[in-house]
């Protein structure tokens, strides 16, 4: 609900549990008054009283010396005019800096607007979505910023958008434009409010999304990507937390960008000990020339608050992803168990090999067979053929549709790997159109994995990609597609855009964002042309796993690292912002191809079953015992997949804190739950172990079973306070799964 109070100068955005309150300070500035646990909406008197300006501060216009903008919590701050914190944007209109933004008008309406060309949270029939929109204008230039706040009441989340308009008759040069900026106004004094930490996700290829907390003690901490993709190295999602915020309690103010290109999020502590958090397009790789009458739409930012620790924060994001981010058709549709041939064969396969894998997989209960890289052009290694999406007849002489039919004949769905955005220098596509890749005149065409990136800023390139990809997927009537993207940006220029003509008119600096818009255009067109196909995103594993891509691809290949123990951390970190159903997790062979570690099959299975289950190995090599184990695992997963894929997921023990990992899936009515528990290294004489559960109903009596056999009965309150006793066996790589069901 949005409440308008105090003669239209106070705006209270109320979600189920939280309040976000804005005011128009001094009848001019859109200011931030409060964001936290819900307060009564009739707090009409809420006001903001800034600290008096100190020596060495500046007053705004010399008529009112009672305050300095440096002390006002602003919602879209401009710099260089007395506020010494970081600005939310920098722009020049007809050569003049934009240095003023006052509220010109506002309105409230039901629902939310779509963002032209960009993904955003969708209403999807929810009756509780409302939007508050402010127009901020500069008195001297033709710059306008439209700030909109869409309140998703049920998810406890606010989607923020910023659109910049050029109302004048000369171009507006935008040098930076964040999607959001928040000046947190925390209660208390001193250490009560001056010791916040930034929690973010960091890593690398095959080591994505480790949780990092760092105190923001002075100045600014920034996390970002300049790689053209949201990144393995960091993730465009983060939270500002108290030092005592844990998984189960404490405060978190969290942010997620619905964007897949270069981004930055910054957390700054000012001289008062207050925090400014802002984020959006990365200013170091962005600029935009906005023509007269034009609008520039910044990517969407999702903001949520929790006083129930990180688990409350994750609940809000998971609800949001399931209800408002994923494509509706897949939001609650159970996902098939798949097998992918990549680690089984790499590039070395033929039809007979693929069909032998498919046949065995079918016997084990797998439902979808995916042909990974290597089926097209002359692709026997990664040096060739990207862009030439025609079947390699040396490997698959019968053609793609014949292979697909044979796979379907076995009773499996058929899926295919593609990498639509790329071109190999050794390809017919590149030989025909050498200027179709991103490049800079006179500079090297720097390769990564022997490939170049197609220039998605160009319409004819996008049209040709869509044509080729839709055609190949239609020929084989693919049920599933793995959409890969295997290199970061470098020397990224476009032959079509004009060169930079002056230090402020940096057309070539528009490329990264234009690419992202081009990417969304081809994703939209291809997924709309093939509405029944299940798409899985991938960028060398989880390199572009973000809220933007998830709008088109309801699942994502979480990491190229398939080692079960490495995956504990990767999946745990990923779950902070994304629900398990979007995580593609595969059981792979031992020794693992990335770590050379051997892990028991049960642990490999349970780790992969903690989300969207798949396999990435050659099942024809299974022993009879392993086959039996996998067959029962698949049957068990099918029986519980609804709960795993769409139940509530809560983390119980963190792999970042030691030897143990644990999580729980709880059904909506809390009458069923599954507890997964993992111990990496065996401990001798370690005393009695237990795990404290979470998310259950206190007064339900649960029957706890292992492998279908009841072992004890305990109430929800006991399980959440005394814990669930464990009796693990000895040996490294121990994994347990407990099934809880309410006793009638
Ligand atoms: C990337 C993906 C892998 C696999 C290979 C194929 O690395 O992440 O899963 O598809 O490409 O080349």
Image: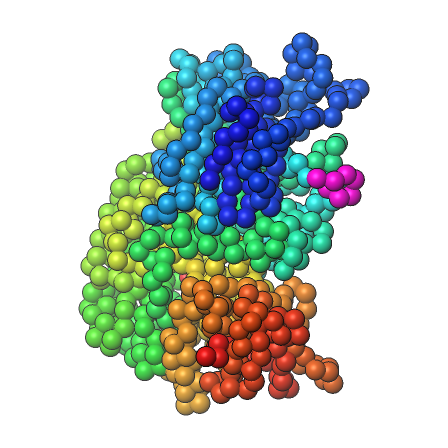
| Residue nearest the observer in this picture, 378 or 342 | 342
Q: Residue furthest front?
A: 42
Is 644 rendered above or below residue 50?
below
Picture coordinates of residue 389, whole percent (x, y):
28, 55
Magenta residue span: 187-194
- Identify the residue shown where x is 54% and y is 20%: 101
Tell me: 655 left or right of 740.
Answer: right
Q: Position of residue 475 (x, y in %)?
A: 20, 59
User: Relative to 429, is 613 above or below?
Assistant: below
Q: Residue at x 47, y 73 (%)?
A: 672
Color style of the picture? rainbow
User: Number of callouts in the render?
Assistant: 0
For the stretch drawn in magenta, what is the main secondary structure?
loop
Residue at 52% over, 12% down: 140
Q: Quadrant of ligand 1?
A: bottom left
Residue displayed at 64% across by 50% down: 251
Return the x and y of residue 552 as percentages of the image width and height: 36, 50
| Outermost top residue | 63
Q: Nearer the viewer, residue 233 or 446?
A: 233
Q: Is residue 733 found left or right of 517 in the rendered image?
A: right
Which quadrant would residue 112 be assigned to in this image? top left
Tell me if 209 is positioned left or right of 84 in this view.
left
97 versus 332 height, above or below: above
Residue at the bottom extreme of this rendering: 624
Specify whether residue 550 is painted magenta.
Answer: no
Residue 682 visible within the image = yes
**Residue 46, relative to residue 93: is it above or below?**
below
Residue placed most toward the observer, 159 or 679:
159
Report whether 322 appears left or right of 376: right
Q: Is residue 606 visible?
A: no
Q: Quadrant of the rendered structure where residue 246 is?
A: bottom right
Counting from the top left corner in percent of width and height, residue 105 is at: 46, 21
């Amino acid at each position: 609900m949005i409440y308008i109070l105090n003669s239209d100068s106070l705006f209270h955005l109320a979600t189920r549990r939280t309040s976000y309150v804005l005011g128009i300070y001094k009848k001019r500035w859109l200011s931030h008054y409060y964001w936290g646990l819900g307060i009564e909406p009739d707090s009409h008197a809420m006001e903001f009283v800034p600290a008096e300006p100190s020596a060495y501060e500046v007053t705004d216009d010399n008529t009112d010396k009672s305050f300095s903008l440096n002390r006002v919590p602003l919602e879209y701050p401009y710099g260089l005019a007395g506020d010494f914190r970081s600005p939310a944007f920098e722009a020049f209109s007809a050569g003049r800096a934009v240095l003023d933004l006052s509220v010109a008008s506002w309105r409230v309406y039901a629902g939310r607007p779509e963002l032209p060309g960009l993904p955003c949270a969708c209403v999807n029939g929810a009756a509780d979505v409302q939007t508050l929109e402010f127009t901020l204008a500069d008195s001297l230039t033709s710059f306008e910023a439209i700030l909109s706040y869409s309140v998703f009441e049920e998810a406890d989340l606010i989607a923020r958008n910023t659109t910049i308009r050029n109302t004048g008759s000369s171009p507006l040069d935008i040098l930076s434009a964040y999607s959001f900026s928040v000046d947190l106004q925390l209660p208390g004094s001193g250490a009560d409010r001056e010791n916040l930490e930034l929690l973010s996700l960091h890593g690398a290829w095959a080591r994505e999304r480790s949780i990092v907390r760092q105190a923001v003690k002075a100045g600014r901490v920034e996390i970002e990507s300049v790689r053209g993709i949201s990144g393995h190295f960091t993730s465009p999602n983060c939270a500002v937390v108290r030092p005592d915020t844990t998984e189960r309690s404490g405060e978190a103010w969290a942010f997620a960008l619905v964007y897949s290109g270069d981004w930055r999020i910054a957390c700054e502590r000012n001289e008062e000990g207050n925090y400014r958090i802002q984020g959006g397009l990365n200013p170091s790789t962005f600029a935009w020339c906005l023509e007269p009458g034009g609008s520039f739409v910044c990517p969407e930012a999702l903001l949520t608050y929790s006083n129930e620790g990180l688990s409350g924060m994750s609940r809000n994001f998971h609800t949001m992803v399931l209800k408002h981010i994923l494509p509706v058709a897949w939001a609650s549709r159970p996902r098939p168990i798949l097998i992918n041939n990549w680690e089984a064969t790499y590039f070395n396969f033929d039809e007979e090999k693929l069909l032998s894998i498919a046949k065995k997989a079918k016997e084990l209960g797998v439902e979808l067979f995916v042909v990974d890289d290597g089926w097209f052009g002359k692709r026997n290694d990664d040096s060739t053929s990207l862009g030439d999406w025609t079947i390699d007849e040396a490997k698959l002489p019968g053609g793609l549709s014949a292979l697909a039919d044979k796979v379907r004949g076995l009773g499996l769905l058929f899926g295919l790997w593609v990498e639509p955005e790329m071109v190999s220098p050794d390809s017919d596509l590149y030989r025909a159109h050498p200027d179709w890749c991103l490049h800079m005149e006179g500079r090297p065409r720097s390769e990564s994995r022997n490939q170049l990136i197609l220039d998605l800023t160009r319409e004819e390139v996008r049209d040709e990609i869509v044509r080729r990809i839709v055609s190949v997927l239609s020929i084989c009537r693919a049920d599933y597609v793995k959409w890969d993207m295997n290199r970061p940006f470098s020397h990224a220029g476009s032959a079509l855009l004009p060169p930079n003509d002056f230090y402020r008119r940096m057309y070539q600096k528009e490329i990264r964002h234009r690419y992202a818009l081009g990417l969304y255009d081809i994703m939209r067109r291809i997924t709309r042309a093939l509405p029944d196909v299940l798409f899985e995103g991938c960028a060398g594993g989880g390199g572009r796993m973000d809220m933007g891509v998830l709008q088109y691809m309801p699942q994502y290949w979480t990491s190229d690292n398939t080692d079960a123990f490495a995956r504990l951390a990767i999946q745990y970190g990923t779950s902070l912002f994304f629900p398990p159903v979007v995580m593609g997790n595969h059981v792979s062979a031992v020794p693992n191809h990335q770590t050379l570690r051997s892990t028991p099959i049960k642990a490999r299975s349970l780790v992969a079953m903690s989300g969207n289950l798949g396999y990435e190995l050659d099942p024809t090599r299974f022993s009879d015992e392993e086959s039996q184990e996998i067959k029962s695992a698949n049957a068990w997963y099918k029986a519980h997949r609804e709960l795993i894929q769409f139940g509530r997921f809560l983390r119980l023990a963190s792999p970042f804190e030691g030897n143990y990992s644990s999580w729980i899936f709880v059904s909506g009515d809390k009458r069923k739950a599954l507890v997964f528990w993992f111990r990496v290294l065996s401990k001798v004489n370690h005393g009695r172990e237990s795990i404290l559960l979470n998310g259950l109903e206190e007064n339900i009596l649960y029957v706890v079973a292992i492998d279908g056999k009841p072992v004890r009965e305990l109430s929800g309150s006991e399980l959440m306070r005394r814990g669930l006793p464990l009796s693990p066996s000895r040996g490294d790589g121990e994994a347990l799964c407990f099934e809880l069901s309410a006793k009638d």
